[in-house]
Amino acid sequence: MELWYTEQHSDDVRFSIRVEKQLYGSRSDFQEICVYHSTEFGNFLTLDGYLMITEKDEYIYHEMITHVPLAVNPNVHRALVIGAGDGGTVRELVRYKTITQIDMVEIDQKVVEVCKEFFPNVASGFADPRVRVYYEDGLRYIRSHRNEYDLIIVDSTDPFGPGEGLFSKEFFGNCTNALTDDGILVNQHESVFYREYAAAMRKTHRIINGYFPVCRVYQAHIPTYPSGHWLFGFASKRFDPLRDQDPGWRDLGITTRYYNPELHRGCFAIPNSVIEQLEALE
């Protein structure tokens, strides 16, 4: 008998992967955590039945959420990551020698433990001495920090369950306060292809746009995410992601599989369907 993992992308659309075997399954204090192995995607992680990462395509998401802001301001010294229990964003951050402090806030310690065991390549950055991990609610953590971080990356789950508070007006207002005057905020911005995800994108963008003078949206193709077309938000008090793109990023010698400086400019050329939804918020 064949075993299939199936995720509901909308009321009328499902996405499935044939599973060779289940490697792990348990419920933490916050959510159900499962790891499966598939022929096509290797190991993949689900939280409450929603796919988070696969070994085959995780690099796309993690490179795009990390290298885009750092190619705008490569002189980031203090970075905060909220969510990201799999460690992929931290793995990309530790490649920058200029960063002296990387704080990660993850509500569910069990996710980190599971990813260290079943996704050692993704979670490899946790071993870096610059990384400090705080197991607490990101919404609560950010309240007590002011003018501290040059970069905040919100690598959250979708806006329900443990990650719901990371899409609130209070949260993004506190992120603004926690950033320095040159600070950059990047977040996973959902998609516009399916109605439920589009509604979440519009709500999040409206909130962020109310706090930052620079507020842009960029995109990536991630095969295992709903519709494959995924958005990220870029917000800053000063830096524009196109005007201020650093021409010397290649000189850092960072090898990537998806991101490059040409793609950096192209990823902000978003489709009309996205532009229309953003313009409707203005």
Image: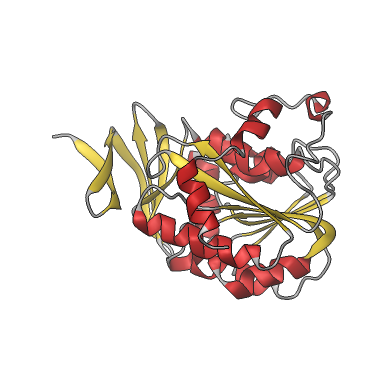
- 107 or 114, nearer to the observer: 107
- Quadrant showing the N terminus: top left
Image coordinates of residue 75 in percent, x first then y, are: 86, 43
- Left or right side of 245 for 269: left
Name above or below for residue 133 compared with residue 244: below
Q: How many labels does the image show?
A: 0
For residue 258, which quarter of the picture?
top right
Image location (x, y in percent) of residue 89: 63, 44
**Residue 225, image x, y percentages:** 41, 42
Q: Foreground residue, 1 or 206?
A: 206
Residue 158, position as x, y percentages in the image:
46, 58
At x 76%, y 37%, the residue is: 71
Q: Quadrant of the C terminus?
A: bottom right
**Residue 136 is at least partly visible in this image:** no
Q: Please name whichever residue, 68 or 194, is drawn nearer the observer in this view of the structure.
A: 194
Residue 254 visible in the shown view: yes
The answer to which quarter of the image holds residue 17 is top left
Q: Looking at the image, which residue is at 82% across and 45% down?
A: 99
